[in-house]
Structure formats: C-alpha cells, structure tokens
C-alpha cells in the first residue's frame, strides 16, 4: 500500500522542526546578547590594522580550546597594535568554549566593522578588542546591558527567595574565584567576573549587579545584568529548575560541584541530541524509500 503523501509531508515537517529545536537548544550559548562598537573607525590603507586584528583574533580563538579566559596583544608596537581578550562562561566545556569564541571574529566584523574598539557578548562568551592607546577609563561596575523577563512571579515570597539565592551567589563567586552557579528553591542563579579580577573586587562587582537586578527587575521571573567586569543572571522555574536540584541544599554546594553538574547535563543533552538526530535520519531514509516504492507501484499500474 502506498504511503499517503499528506502523511509523508507532515512527518517530514515534524522531523525538520525536531532537528531544528535540537540544534537551537544545543547552541543557545551562541545567541547574541549585545554589541558595543566604538564610533571611531580606523583608516587602513596599508592593511596594518587589519593584519594586527586578524592576528589577535587568531590568537584568541586558538587559546579558547584550552582556556576560559585569555588576553593578548598583537602588532608592531605603538598605535598600530591591537589588544584584546575573550572569556567563556565558567560552565562551558572546552569544545563549547571554542565553538562560541570562534564565532566572535566574524560577528565583530559584521556588526562593528573597522572600529577602533568593539565588544561582542554572546550568552556563552564574549570578546573585546581595542587599538592600543584608544583605551577609555571605564569603571568595572559600569553597566553595559540589562534585561528583565516580561513575566512577574505570582504569589508572595519570590523576591525573598531570589535575594537569598543572590546572597549565596555573592559568596560563591568569591570562594569560587570568579564563577558560581547554583539552584535554590526553584531559582537558578549565575555570576561571573572577568578572569583577571581579584576575589574581593569580584564580590563587589557582583554585589553591584545584584542591586541593579533587585531594583530594576523587581519581581520579574528572570533577568541578566552585564557590568564592565562581571555579570549575573537568574531564572525562576515554578515547577523546579529543570535537570538540577532545586532544594536549598544545592545552594550550599561548592562552585566546583556546580561546574561538574552543569557539564554533565550538557554532555547528556548532546548524547540525546545525537541519538535523536540519528533516529530522525534513519526515519527520513525509510520514508524516502517508501515514497519511491509507492511511485514505482503507481507507474506499474498504468
């Protein structure tokens, strides 16, 4: 019996959107958060700046296979040199860090062009560069970007639980030397400082970001605050943090435990995606064979 064309079309659509969802969930760390581009551009008739910038990007990307934070300077010295850095979120694996950072040079060129300084922030990593000598004095606590979820938490007690989670995180980034992520009573919180910021300054930076989130996001169920030298994020899950422990005991876990838990969750997700992707591919092949067989029978019947 031939395979109905309508059913075939619907099933093909289902496979397509299933694979699309898997791809999106696997690469959410590459989602653009914001861009910062200098208003000044550099004239480069001899290609000196372009060569220095290309060399800088290459150095940063190559280091992202083995480090979560790296700074470099390239060029011939003086104002024709470029300095820059990248940082990955502390819970990313080395391969995800590389995949995230390797996107940034192309995005920088596309979004900012030949500017004397630029910063591109993705969910999982960021990169910044500037022409040596261009540097402007910016406070480490200057806000760069802030977003709050459009939905407010229902019922009482949300802000108290969130503030308790924030307090745990503020202590965690200090003891964790710059990164901490944990869950606490249906809230998932994360904080990170730039790699060369000391523990004490990191704690102050995160505290400043927390205060902004408390004031500007209010009872919103999610928020992200990016300062020059640190960022925080939080999300509220009424039915419990997915794939993580939502009890208060997890809030007292060390940053190393949070790191291991997150990495394990990512590996599990990748395994499931690979299995489902393979199954979808086999199903697609079977459908094609059935469709071809149906067409052949119809021709034979004429």
Image: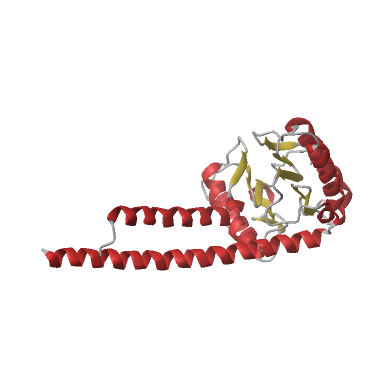
Give the quarter of the image for residue 223.
Answer: top right
Q: Nearer the viewer, residue 158 or 55?
A: 158
Q: Nearer the viewer, residue 262 or 62?
A: 262
Rendering coords of residue 170 (x, y %):
85, 47
Identity of the residue drawn at 65% across and 50% down: 127
Q: In this picture, is 127 found above or below 270?
A: above
Furthest residue in direction left, as rendered: 302
Rendering coords of residue 132 (x, y %):
69, 47
Identity of the residue drawn at 68% across and 57% down: 243
Rendering coords of residue 134 (x, y %):
69, 41
Quadrant location of the C terminus?
bottom left
Identity of the residue drawn at 69% across and 33% down: 152
Seen in the image, is 276 located left or right of residue 1?
Answer: right
Rendering coords of residue 299 (x, y %):
15, 64
Q: Is residue 198 visible?
A: no
Quadrant location of the N terminus?
bottom left
């Amino acid at each position: 019996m031939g395979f109905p064309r309508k059913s075939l079309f619907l099933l093909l659509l289902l496979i397509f959107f299933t694979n699309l969802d898997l791809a999106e969930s696997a690469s959410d760390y590459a989602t653009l958060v914001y861009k910062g581009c200098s208003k000044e551009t550099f004239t480069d008739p001899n290609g000196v700046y372009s060569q220095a910038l290309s060399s800088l990007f290459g150095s940063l990307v190559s280091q992202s296979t083995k480090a979560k934070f790296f700074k470099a300077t390239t060029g011939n010295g003086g104002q024709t040199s470029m300095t820059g850095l990248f940082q990955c979120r502390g819970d990313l694996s080395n391969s995800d860090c590389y995949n995230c950072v390797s996107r940034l040079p192309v995005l920088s060129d596309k979004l900012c062009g030949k500017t004397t300084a630029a910063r591109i922030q993705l969910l999982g990593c960021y990169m910044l560069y500037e022409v040596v000598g261009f540097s402007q004095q910016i406070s480490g606590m200057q806000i760069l970007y802030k977003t709050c979820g459009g939905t407010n938490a229902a019922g009482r007690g949300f802000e108290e639980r969130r503030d308790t989670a924030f307090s745990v995180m503020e202590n965690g980034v200090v003891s964790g030397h710059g990164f901490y992520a944990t869950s606490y009573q249906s809230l998932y919180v994360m904080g990170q400082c730039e790699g060369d910021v000391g523990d004490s300054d990191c704690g102050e930076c995160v505290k400043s970001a927390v205060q902004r989130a408390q004031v500007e996001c209010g009872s919103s169920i999610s928020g992200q605050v990016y300062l020059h030298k640190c960022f925080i994020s939080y999300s509220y899950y009424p039915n419990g943090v997915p794939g993580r422990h939502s009890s208060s005991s997890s809030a007292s876990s060390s940053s190393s435990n949070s790191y291991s838990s997150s990495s394990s969750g990512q590996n599990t997700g990748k395994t499931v995606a690979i299995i489902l992707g393979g199954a979808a591919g086999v199903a697609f092949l079977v459908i094609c064979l059935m469709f071809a067989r149906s067409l052949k029978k119809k021709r034979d019947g004429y």
